[in-house]
């Protein structure tokens, strides 16, 4: 019996309209009632994920900022935190300026952009958080960032990702979370390492964990879980890594997975014990 399920948000738990179906909410709450730890593993910033978790009735530590921060949905002290060092942030900010690419940064649960443009405004609206304009991002970088996010066309980001991996090597984690999003975090800030850290804190074995995602930044989540699930709308690379492929995010793929691997097995066990 699985004791923990970690679910990505965008493209996974959330539909393309950024909603969660009532049936999925009900299944999540039933799983929690049965003692299963249901948590969120997202690249989103903590305040954005927190709002969704509280709407779902979850009172557990969440994995946010791509794994850079683990913190309870109800607040309190961080269980784990990994910030991007100044040297890495400096290189990314300089590259963004040289290439005239949009970059935004995250510090103390605040989203900062050097300018107010269509990209940061669209992102802010999508995730439901505000942003602040700070022309000197390097000044902020001295205190460390949870992550840096490049937003641009897919082809440009593919080239940038290769360039950054060559430049930074193992000094940073560089992953695409969407076609137009390229995220840079601390080298130990990925969903997989965060998941295993959280599971250890909760006394849950890797074999007892389900991880569900849809994009490149979910690869470590799917690989680190004892049972990895890719959504039907997932990128091909993630489907190849996964143990199972569910329905898409618009077809209640998370609901399908919870029913199949959490609720139905427990129902069958309960029937057998009667």
Image (cartoon, helix red, strand yellow):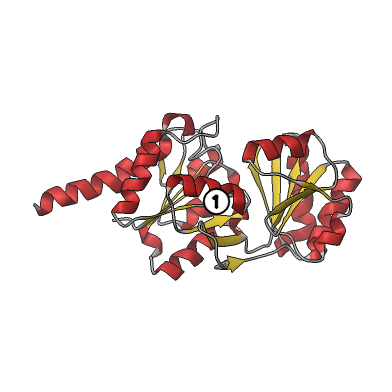
Q: Closer to the camera, 38 or 76?
A: 76
Residue in view at x 77 percent, y 52 percent? 164
Report whether residue 24 is seen: yes
Q: Is residue 172 above or below residue 40?
A: below
Residue 27 coordinates in the image, percent (x, y): 34, 42
Q: Is residue 74 above or below residue 26?
A: below
Residue 222 coordinates in the image, percent (x, y): 48, 51
Residue in view at x 88 percent, y 50 percent? 135
Using the rendered view, name the quadrant where residue 119 is placed: top right
Callout 1 crowding tier (Cα within 10 Å): few <14, some 14–19, many ≥20: many
SS for tag 1? Answer: helix
Image-based side of 192 in relation to 1, left or right? right
Residue in view at x 62 percent, y 66 percent? 81
Q: Closer to the camera, 83 or 59?
A: 59
Q: Closer to the camera, 237 or 148?
A: 148
Residue 254 coordinates in the image, percent (x, y): 41, 40
Residue 162 coordinates in the image, percent (x, y): 75, 48
Q: Is residue 154 above or below residue 114?
A: above
Residue in view at x 45 percent, y 70 percent? 201
Q: Closer to the camera, 98 or 65?
A: 65
* Quadrant (top left/top right/bottom left/bottom right) for the N terminus: bottom left
Using the rendered view, name the quadrant where residue 101 is placed: top right
Kindly identify which residue carries mark 1.
50
């Amino acid at each position: 019996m699985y004791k923990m399920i970690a679910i990505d948000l965008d493209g996974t738990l959330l539909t393309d309209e950024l909603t969660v179906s009532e049936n999925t909410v009900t299944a999540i709450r039933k799983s929690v009632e049965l003692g299963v730890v249901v948590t969120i593993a997202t690249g989103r910033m903590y305040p954005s994920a927190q709002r969704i978790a509280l709407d779902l009735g979850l009172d557990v530590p969440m994995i946010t900022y791509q794994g850079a921060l683990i913190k309870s949905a109800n607040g309190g002290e961080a269980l784990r935190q990994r910030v991007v060092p100044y040297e890495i942030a400096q290189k990314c900010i300089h590259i963004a300026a040289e290439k005239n690419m949009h970059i935004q940064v995250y510090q103390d649960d605040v989203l900062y952009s050097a300018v107010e443009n269509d990209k940061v405004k669209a992102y802010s609206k999508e995730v439901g958080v505000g942003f602040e304009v700070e022309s000197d991002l390097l000044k902020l970088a001295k205190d460390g960032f949870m992550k840096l996010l490049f937003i641009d066309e897919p082809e440009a980001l593919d080239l940038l990702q290769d360039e950054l991996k060559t430049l930074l090597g193992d000094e940073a984690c560089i992953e695409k979370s969407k076609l137009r999003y390229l995220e840079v975090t601390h080298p130990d800030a990925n969903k997989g390492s965060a998941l295993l850290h959280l599971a250890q804190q909760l006394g849950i074995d890797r074999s007892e964990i389900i991880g569900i995602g849809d994009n490149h930044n979910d690869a470590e989540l799917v690989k680190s879980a004892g049972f990895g699930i890719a959504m039907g709308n997932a990128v091909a690379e993630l489907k190849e890594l996964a143990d199972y492929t569910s329905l898409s995010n618009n077809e209640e793929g998370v609901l399908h997975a919870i029913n199949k691997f959490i609720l139905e097995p427990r129902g069958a066990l309960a029937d057998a014990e009667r």
